[in-house]
Image: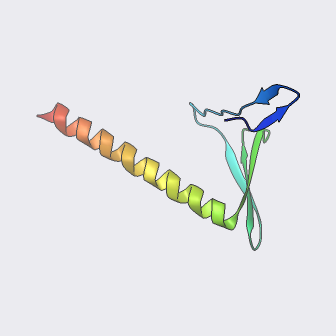
Amino acid sequence: MSIFTKQGVSVDLWIEMAETVPMHVEVDPPNQATIHFGSNSDYVVVLCRENLVRLAEVATEALCTLDAELSAKSSVGGN
């Protein structure tokens, strides 16, 4: 899925944070948050309140799934 197409050139975006990355947030009340990634704000995501809530929900779901997988592997390895 392309995020931008112009004159036959297609641009996709993929960001992977394999290591600990500095992050900070700025808020613009009442409905916007800006999350900065990297020590020099190399990547920035601006989210409205509704999308920030959804991102938090999805991140929580991912953490729960990872924890469940880790727990299942630990219990299998411990028997």
25 w.r.t. 20: above or below: below
53 left or right, relative to 66: right
Q: Quadrant of residue 78?
A: top left
Question: Nearest the camera: 49 or 70?
Answer: 49
Please name whichever residue, 8 or 39, is drawn nearer the observer in this view of the structure: 8
| The C terminus: image quadrant | top left
**Residue at the spot x=38%, y=43% of the render?**
66
- The residue at the far top in this view is 8
Relative side of 78 to 38, left or right = left
Residue drawn at (64%, 38%) of the image: 21
Q: Position of residue 42 (x, y in %)?
A: 78, 37
Question: Residue drawn 66% across and 35% down?
Answer: 1
Dividing the picture into quarters, in which one does residue 27 lie? bottom right
- Which of the two residues, 15 or 26, is positioned nearer the viewer here? 15
In the shown orientation, is residue 17 left or right of residue 27? left
The spot of residue 47 in percent (x, y) is 72, 58
Where in the figure is residue 74, as x and y percent of width and height? 23, 37
Quarter occupied by residue 19: top right
Residue positioned 75% across, 74% down in the render: 30
Q: Is residue 66 above or below residue 11?
A: below
Q: How many marks?
A: 0
Q: In the image, is 36 to the left or to the right of 55?
A: right
Looking at this view, name the residue that lies furthest to the left. 79
